[in-house]
Amino acid sequence: MITPDLPAQLPPGVAEKLGVYVYALRDPRDKSIFYIGKGKGDRVFSHVWVARGQKGRVKDGTQKDPIAVESAKNARINAIYADGSKVEHFILRPNITPPVDSDKLAFQFEQVLISAFKLAETDLENPKLTTIKGGHTSGEFVVEPIEETIKRLAAVPAGKIEKPFVVLVSTNPAYKTWSDEEIYDNVAGSWYASGAVGLPDLPILVVHAGLIRAVFRADRWEPSATEAKKWRFYGAVDPELDAMYRGKSLHYNDIDRDPPLAGWSTRGWHLYT
């Protein structure tokens, strides 16, 4: 059995963007949270490094736990690796700051608790906690595997994109792991795209959670057989544009447009000419 690699140190600049945070360690075998702590820098990874005999990697200190807690935690981590799996790391709340008042402090507590309950839920479509999909601060931070958090925080901006192009925005978390074929099957249509069908070789940038996930080139359009005035595009990943933009960040306020966008459309379709 191949032992999974240990987590690497955070890329430059990511620790500063995370600030002081609360984090959780989860067992991938049964999706149970077995540790919650707070820290900054690489603290989130320090438990695995120490348990696996790599204490020299620790630069931002370790959590001072009672002996019984330390022993149980290390045993759990080593059992996970012995089974060929690896610990799942999550940031429950980044940038913990001194509260202006008690309400602000309560908001931070609320976000941490909602995030933790979300990780523990077995059915997010029918959660036991009714505020899983709400809460005063639910829109501020998305709980996701730390690999995705790092990817977003380390991403460089896409910069100016030559017009014309289309941005398709999705909130589907599956975009983080889907193949290009799966992404295409999901985004190809149908769209209210009458303004785009006459534009040859139109670049289509697919965005999820602020990152460009793929760039297609629409070489033809066909009207939807079932939805009036809607269209489907046909094309493949554009190798040059995809290499240039995939993994870079793109937000609505990065787009050169007059008047400026107030946010992405809930329909997901954005044509820029």
Image: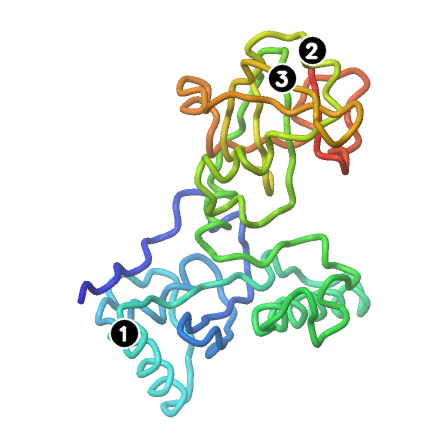
Residue 273 shows which numbered tag? 2
Q: Earlier in the sequence, mark 1 or mark 2?
A: 1
Disc 1 element: loop
Residue 13 versus residue 74: which sits nearer the camera? 74
Measuring from the top left, give residue 99's x and y in whole percent: 73, 63
User: Which residue is the site of mark 3?
Assistant: 221
The reply to whether callout 1 and callout 2 are in contact (CB within 8 Å) is no
> What distance separates the C-alpha of mark 2 from that of mark 3?
17 Å
Q: Is residue 212 above or below residue 88?
A: above
> What distance separates the C-alpha of mark 3 from that of mark 1?
49 Å
Residue 83 shows which numbered tag? 1
At label 2, which amino acid type do we have? Thr
Position of the C terminus, as image quadrant, is: top right
Q: Quadrant of residue 84?
A: bottom left
Q: Is residue 73 above or below residue 181?
A: below
Q: Earlier in the sequence, mark 2 or mark 3?
A: 3
Q: Residue at x 73, y 33 (%)?
A: 264
At label 3, which amino acid type do we have? Trp
Measuring from the top left, give residue 55's x and y in whole percent: 26, 68
Residue 30 shows which numbered tag? none
Disc 3 element: strand
Query: How are the residues colored?
Result: rainbow
Q: Quadrant of residue 22?
A: bottom right
Q: Residue at x 53, y 33 (%)?
A: 184
Residue 265 versus residue 252: which sits nearer the camera? 265
At label 1, which amino acid type do we have? Asp
Q: Earlier in the sequence, mark 3 or mark 1?
A: 1
